[in-house]
Image: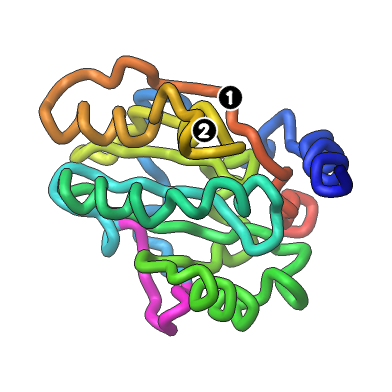
Amino acid sequence: MKQLILIVLMAFSVSVFASSNGKLEIGDKAVLTDVKMTDVSGKSISLNDVKKENGVLVVFSCNTCPFVGKWEERYSEIKAWADKNKVGMVVVNSNHQKRDGEESLEAMKKHAADKNYNFFYAVDHDSRLANAFGGQTTPHAFLFDSKMTLVYKGAIDDSYESADKVKYSYVKDAISSISSGKEVAITETKPVGCGIKRKISQEL
């Protein structure tokens, strides 16, 4: 019961609008693709580094959101699906306001190890990517095709509660479409999660 109440309260903290710095719409080109981010491995990576032949998947996430806790068991499966379809994948943490605590790089390293992450998990310094993309929640997925055009944004699938309840695998279906040269059927869904604790424009 306490967990349910916590999830409901966190849902109310979801951002209902993007930062005034920017918001990518379907059909827009990716931005900040050469900006380096620090991965939990210690490497500096950019979207251009991560991108593969058919595109790149960017997922805004974090260590502490209960919605991430429900969904992240599926991250590795999505990574395998992306690899199979020649799409790169990076999970980014934009929670600037918690960077000195539970969302620090050291905390991210521990979280990645505890959860057996097998993909890039990088710090979005000063929430630059979240602000430029219009990332709203953790999680919030953005899929770009081979030309770095945004073809899908929104939720990972239609059930954060359980993989067994999923009827529509939005991200996986979109990845399948771009890898086979087809148009993405569902291009946008409402993201569900905790609001990103971003560095707001006034701080920039």
Secondary element at tag 2: loop
| Residue kind at label 2, given as amino acid type | Ala
Q: Is residue 83 above or below residue 37?
A: above
Where in the figure is residue 56, as x and y percent of width and height? 30, 47
Q: Is residue 155 above or below residue 111?
A: above
Front position in the image: 73 or 57: 73
Q: Which mark is residue 155?
A: 2
Q: Quadrant of the C terminus?
A: bottom right
Q: Which mark is residue 190?
A: 1
Instruction: Tell me which residue sits at (34%, 57%) in the image.
Output: 47
Instruction: Tell me which residue sits at (52%, 33%) in the image.
Output: 155
Q: Is residue 91 above or below residue 38?
A: above
Range drawn in magenta: 38-47
Q: Earlier in the sequence, mark 2 or mark 1?
A: 2
Q: Quadrant of the N terminus?
A: top right
Q: Are marks 2 and 1 in contact (CB under 8 Å)?
A: yes
Report whether residue 24 is seen. no
Where in the figure is residue 92, as x and y percent of width and height? 51, 59
